[in-house]
Structure formats: C-alpha cells, structure tokens
Image (cartoon, rainbow, N blue to C red):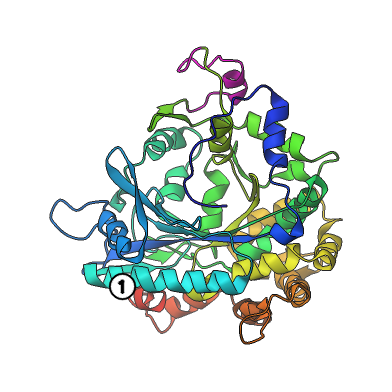
Amino acid sequence: MSGPSKPNLQPIHGRDDLVGWLESGNKPRAEWRLGTEHEKFAYRLSDKAPLPYADPAGGPGIRDMLKGLEAYGWQPVEENGAVIAMTRDDGGSISLEPGGQLELSGAPLETVHQTCTEVTTHRKQVREVAERLGVGLIGLGFAPTWRREDMHWMPKGRYAIMREYMPKVGTMGLDMMLRTCTVQVNMDYASEADMVKKFRVATALQPLATALWANSPFKEGQLNGYRSYRAHVWTDTDNNRAGLPEFAFEDGFGFERYVDYLLDVPMYFVARDGRYINVAGRSFRDFLEGKLPELPGETPTLGDWADHASTAFPDVRLKKYMEMRGSDGGPWSRLCALPAFWGGLLYDDDALDEAWHLVKDWTPEERRALHSQVPVTALKTPFRGGTVQDLALEALRIARAGLGRRARLSADGMDESGFLEPLQRIADTGMTPADELIEAFSSRWNGSLEPLWAAYAY
C-alpha cells in the first residue's frame, strides 16, 4: 500500500485501462490489510525552530534524521543526489512532506496489533536519532507557532511544482504543504460494489474522524478559532482536487465515475528519468491523446496515471485501495486508534451494514454542513436534534462490535477493540484533544505554548 515503487511503464490504450487499474485493487477478504501513515513536525530543541533539510551552520537537519535511521536497517532513496526517503523490504517507508514533516508510511499489515507494534518501534527509532541530534518531534494537526516564512522547503521536484501552482488555486495551499500533519489509514475492497459502500460510509463519517482527532487549535502562538485548523486549511487549498467527494452518493457511482473525476482533476507533473516535468493545470485527457505541449506526441503509462491519482485530495481517496484522510496528526498514543476505528466500521460486514444504515439518508446539505462546521465546533456540531458527539458514540459502538467479530487477537488474547479506548474517552466526555488544549492554554498555561512541546512530544 505504501512506499516508493518502480513506475509501471505499461502503456494506456484507453479509458478501460484506467478503470482496470482501480479494479485491480479488488482483493479477497483474506488479503485485506491496514496500512497506517502518520506525520509529525521536527524542530531544534534549542530554540523550537523547524528543521531545515540541511543546516549550513552545522546544526541538525532533516537529512541527518533520515541518515540516522540507516542504523535500523532503513535504506536511503535519493532524488538528484539528495536523500528524500527511506525504505525497507516489507513495503514501509519514511518520507518527507514539503515542510520537512517526517512521515511513516507503514507496511500493509493484517491487524491493528501489528500496526501498533510498527508505530511503537518507529517512535523508538526516531526518538533515539532525534535525541542524538538535539531534535524534538511533536504530533499536532497544524504547526502551533511557526509562520509560513519560518518553514523550510524539502528538495523534491514535485513540491517545487506544487509550490508554484498552489497560490493560483487557493489561499491556504502552501499552509497545507508546510504546516499540517495528518494520520490516515489505507484499506482494501473486495469488489466494485464493496468499494462503493465503503467509500460512501467513509465519506459520510469522515467528519466524525475529524472531530475525534481534532487537535490543531493554534496558529502562530495564538488560538485560531478552530478545533481542527488543518481541516479548515483544506477548504481553500484547491477545490478542484480536494474536499467532499459528493459525486460518490450519485446513482451509478463506481470505478468509472471515479476515473471521470480523476480525469477532471488538473495535472501537476509528469515524472521522467528521475525528474519532474511541470504540467500544472494541464488535462490528463489531453495527455491520453498525446497533446501535452510539454511532451508532444507522448502518451501516458499506468505509472503516470498512478502519479496523477496521488495528486487528488478528496476526504476519501481511491487508488488501488482507499485512504481515510480526515484526521489531524497527533501523539503516538492516538495513532493506533485510527486503523481500529475504520477497521471496525469497514472490515466487518455487519458493522458496514449498520454504518450504512446510519448515514444512508443524510442529505447533501447535511453532509456539507458537517464538512464545513466540524473543523470549528468538532463534537459539539449540531446534527438532527443532537450533535456529532452522539454520532461518534454510535459509530464507536458499531466499530467496537465489528472489531469483536473480526476477532484478530493479540498474543495475550485481546481483540483490537482496546485501541478504541482513547476515542471512547473523547466521545464520552465530548472533550476533543483540541478542547483540552484550549482549556490548558487559557488556564494553567497562562496563554503560553511553551508547555505544549512537552505535552505533545512524540
């Protein structure tokens, strides 16, 4: 599910090949996996400044963090001579977001127990490297104190293209790139019908995940008026490729309709021979006909299509698997909860049926209202005479039962439902992580964010 791979050079002969690429993700239940990805901010302990890629003054840099991980068996990946990722044989990778956010793209694993072992091992490794370098790591959805101009750009060709293009299509695209962190889980589907049901349930319930994981109430040292400012940033990043994929609820939704959606998403780049060709704003439909001015007469491969699919940013993204994209990044203690939440809802048939029953009669207006209001008010957002807190409690009940029926046991005989406990406490009290941060900032922290670095240390 994750990590750099060799490009697929198979030529595309027509739209059926694009649909077939999505269909090739169909897997029998025995092969369903969970791939968990999370990002965190790295900074100098001495002054809480974000890390550059490489510090000309000799201080620590992101490159040093990556190179330090070689001691644990990670292998470097280079672009134009710069190390920009680390990989390992099981499919996991460590990569860089545009502002130097360190991302673990976990291996596709069978159980949440395995995921939590993976996350815990990764945390131990990066902390050991960070401590040697004088570096700290923090898990939040949005950088709490840094300004946009404080951030350092990582040396990746695709980011240079996006950096130039983003201000043309939204006001907060550069903030998304530089100052946000997320946690997401990648999941499989058995068939087109199974994908459609999961996609619709996941899209409708994504605001619940935004609320339960909300922990980005600060911007440049002050309260920003949101529980999930990260989610708010996505509302004006690039609305041609981000947000609520409402078309998923239309009759006839399936692989073909998602292909049509992707074909309508403007391109960013084409990768050739280790470099990125800027085609930002161009049409993939023109590429299919050999009409890109930058590559005259050349038509795309399935590798180009896979790259293009990765540049769409809806709340739920379809590749040859599905990505749940609605949650703020956070401390390691909540990272294992995300695959448990979505695994419980989507990987058990009875739970999926219950979840679909919960959301199937929601109107487009209700879905849009949740999408726009939850970043502000999180669990307190009104919905049908109740609140999102009520929905979250119901979703957690369904997920817990689903995990019980999944019956994936740890060595000591525990099922995966224990990983929901941090979420259960949040839903029971109605206090999101953001609410706790706001309360601490306004009371015992006396308007200072200095205690935050220790409280949310990774």
- Vertical side of 113 occupied by 250: above or below: above
4 or 396: nearer the eye? 4
Q: For the C terminus, give its image quadrant.
A: bottom left
Q: Where in the figure is residue 364, as x and y percent of width and height?
A: 78, 48
Three-letter amino acid code at the position of disc 1:
Glu
Q: Where in the figure is residue 361, as x and y percent of width and height?
A: 87, 56
Q: Main secondary structure of the magenta part?
A: loop
> Which residue, as the protein is rendered here, is positioned at the far front?
89
Q: Is residue 263 left or right of residue 384?
A: left
Q: Is residue 254 left or right of residue 97?
A: right
Q: Is residue 286 left or right of residue 138?
A: right
Q: Is residue 156 visible?
A: yes
- Vertical side of 398 occupied by 268: above or below: above
Asked if residue 59 lies in the magenta stretch, the reply is: no
Q: Where in the figure is residue 260, as x and y percent of width and height?
A: 70, 31
Q: Where in the figure is residue 307, as x and y percent of width and height?
A: 53, 37
5 or 443: nearer the eye? 5
Q: Which image quarter: residue 375?
A: bottom right
141 or 458: nearer the eye? 458
Q: Is residue 212 visible?
A: no
Q: Secondary structure at mark 1?
A: helix
413 or 89: nearer the eye? 89
Asked if residue 282 lies in the magenta stretch, the reply is: yes
Q: Residue at x 57, y 71 (%)?
A: 114
Q: Which residues are magenta?
A: 280-296
Q: Residue at x 69, y 59 (%)?
A: 32
- Vertical side of 88 occupied by 171: above or below: above
> Which residue, as the protein is rendered here, is positioned at the far top?
297
Q: Which residue is mark 1?
A: 128
